């Protein structure tokens, strides 16, 4: 049995694992990563990158059609094959040679196979050919294995071979009819993408569309989906699923469908998906005595995530396989002083950029502890998120409901984005809204949400204001350029009374 020793061994070579390893190498330690699939992880091949590539073509076409002059120049429809080709490019054709080259250039060792904890600071790697290698860590083992799509225990669902975010992101053709179970980020983005690519989409959103964002943003997205021909069924719940011999998926709904629009919300969560090319008629509804049925060519399940911890040998150090890994404020697993968990796997914030932030913090903490230096606990920071629907939803910090639930004395300030000169210039018929949530006792902003075309590019300014706890009286002097959409900051502060 082969073996090797490093200062740090990282299980998982997605963006989180790569960043942990790069940070410890930068700090003067040696590092190895263990990966059973593709180096680069979920974001590179089945989530952030390919899904945004799928969404971007339709978004650009919509934008052109909203500006006179450009509108007249657009004479064709979306080229689905070209969109899929671009998606494939951004997924690197599901090959990781470029990422492996980066590991080599960064001085990070790669061991391919399933990594399992074998003993204290020892990781056993089982390759595809069955050979095993023991990796010993002098200082730390970091679990950065991420999460996978959750498939709920709905009768018949697994046997019907549904799509998860992975299949949707990598599909080579567009189904004529697509049904979606779920109403969160993945469900909403994929409904947006597939409707634009030609599918007739039905969304079964038991808890409404985007139930964790500000209600006004969820309502804008729900309305836009319906305008695009998507059947949005708020309150609908799948009772059972079958796939017929001809390939048709039949979803039988539970009784008592609710008719709510989009309920009260708190903070945002994260995932994604996609696919490509053919068409037909809508995911049809058929009513039979006692139960309503939805028929579709494919079914996407997008109801949450589950941690990739089932086959890591966690039981060997007294931890529960298949569970989220609890961590302390330094992202170390309590009771196992050499074990850390970063990214989705610790269940804190399931977003790639926040996982990479955790990875950098973990790397610095390991380097400090290895050198006997004081350890600085990473601050609790608000996280930004963009949902790439039509319209985009960009948010950071707390919603109004979440701030009130936390006991803050808040003031909510809203402004119509369409009334900002830069937005009117950006597109005819611009529809959007901005909200800032102010902690009145400290006079700082604790949450911001934008909903509208291309608002993603407004978000970092909001993130700086919230994370930096910039006093409103000081923020007043950050003058936005005219005429840009960012002028909404001036309008929000004026509405507040400054």
Image (cartoon, grey):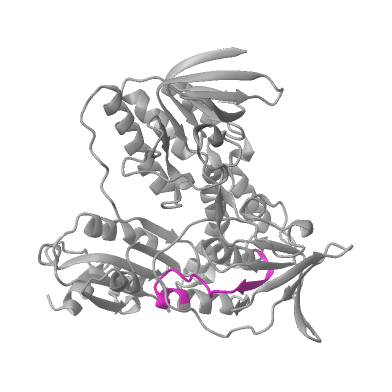
The residue shown at (67%, 52%) is 167
Q: Is residue 85 above or below residue 445?
A: above
Q: x, y percentage for residue 365?
A: 30, 33
Specify the segment rendered in magenta: 197-218
Foreground of the two, 139 or 48: 139
Q: Residue at x 69, y 82 (%)?
A: 255
Viewer-proximal residue among 144 and 421: 144
The vertical placement of 281 against 306, above or below, is below
Q: Is residue 383 visible?
A: yes
Q: Is residue 278 left or right of residue 118?
A: right
The image shows residue 231, relative to residue 61, as above or below, that is: below
Check residue 210 for magenta coloring: yes
The quarter of the picture where the C terminus appears is bottom left
State whether residue 431 appears in this view.
Answer: no
Where is residue 243 drawn, in percent x and y? 82, 63
Q: Quadrant of residue 450?
A: bottom left
From the top left corner, tell me how far across and down residue 162 is, in percent: 72, 58
Residue at 75 percent across and 66 percent down: it is: 176
Q: Position of residue 367 (x, y in %)?
A: 30, 26
| On-image quarter of the N terminus | top right
Residue at the far right: name it.
245
Give the tally of numbered discs: 0
Of the pair 19 and 73, the residue shown nearer to us: 19
Q: In screen coordinates, is 130 left or right of 12?
A: right
Q: Is residue 142 magenta?
A: no
Q: Quadrant of residue 336?
A: top left
At horizontal 22% and vertical 59% (from top left) the residue drawn is 465
């Amino acid at each position: 049995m082969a073996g090797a020793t490093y200062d740090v061994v990282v299980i998982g070579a997605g963006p989180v694992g790569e960043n942990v390893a790069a940070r410890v190498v930068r700090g003067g330690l040696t590092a190895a990563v263990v990966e059973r699939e593709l180096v680069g992880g979920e974001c590179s091949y089945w989530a952030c990158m390919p899904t945004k590539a799928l969404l971007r073509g339709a978004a650009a076409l919509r934008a052109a059609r909203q500006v006179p002059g450009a509108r007249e120049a657009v004479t064709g429809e979306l080229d689905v094959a070209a969109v899929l080709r671009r998606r494939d490019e951004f997924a690197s054709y599901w090959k990781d040679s470029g990422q492996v080259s980066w590991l080599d250039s960064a001085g990070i060792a790669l061991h391919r196979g399933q990594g399992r904890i074998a003993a204290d600071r020892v990781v056993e790697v089982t390759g595809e050919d069955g050979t095993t290698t023991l990796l010993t860590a002098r200082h730390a083992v970091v679990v950065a294995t991420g999460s996978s799509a959750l498939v709920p225990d709905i009768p018949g669902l697994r046997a019907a071979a549904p799509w998860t975010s992975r299949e949707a992101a990598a599909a080579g053709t567009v189904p004529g009819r697509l049904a979606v179970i779920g109403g969160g980020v993945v469900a909403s983005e994929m409904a947006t993408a597939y409707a634009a690519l030609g599918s007739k989409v039905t969304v079964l959103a038991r808890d409404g569309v985007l139930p964790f964002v500000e209600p006004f943003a969820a309502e804008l997205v729900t309305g836009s989906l319906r305008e695009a021909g998507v059947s949005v069924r708020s309150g609908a719940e799948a009772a059972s699923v079958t796939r017929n011999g001809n390939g048709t998926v039949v979803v039988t709904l539970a009784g008592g469908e609710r008719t709510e629009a989009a309920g009260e919300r708190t903070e945002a969560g994260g995932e994604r998906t996609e696919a490509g090319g053919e068409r037909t008629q809508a995911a049809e509804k058929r009513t039979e005595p006692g139960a309503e049925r939805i028929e579709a060519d494919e079914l996407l399940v997008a109801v949450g995530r589950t941690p990739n911890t089932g086959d890591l040998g966690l039981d060997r150090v007294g931890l529960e396989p298949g569970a989220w890994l609890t961590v302390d404020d330094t992202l170390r697993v309590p009771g196992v002083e050499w074990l850390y968990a970063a990214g989705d796997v610790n269940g804190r914030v399931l977003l790639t950029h926040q996982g990479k932030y955790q990875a950098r913090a973990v790397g610095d903490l390991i380097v400090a502890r290895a050198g006997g230096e004081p350890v600085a606990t990473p601050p609790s920071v608000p996280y930004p998120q963009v949902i790439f629907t039509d319209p985009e939803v960009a948010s950071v910090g707390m919603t109004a409901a979440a701030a009130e639930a936390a006991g803050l004395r808040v003031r909510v300030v809203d402004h119509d984005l369409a009334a900002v000169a830069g937005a009117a210039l950006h597109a005819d018929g611009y529809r959007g809204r901005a909200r800032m949530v102010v902690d009145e006792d400290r006079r700082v902003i604790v949450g911001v949400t934008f909903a509208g075309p291309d608002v993603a590019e407004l978000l970092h300014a909001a993130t700086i204001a919230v994370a930096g706890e910039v006093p409103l009286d000081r923020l007043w002097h950050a003058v936005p350029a005219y005429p840009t959409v960012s002028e909404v900051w001036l309008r929000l502060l004026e509405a507040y009374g400054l």
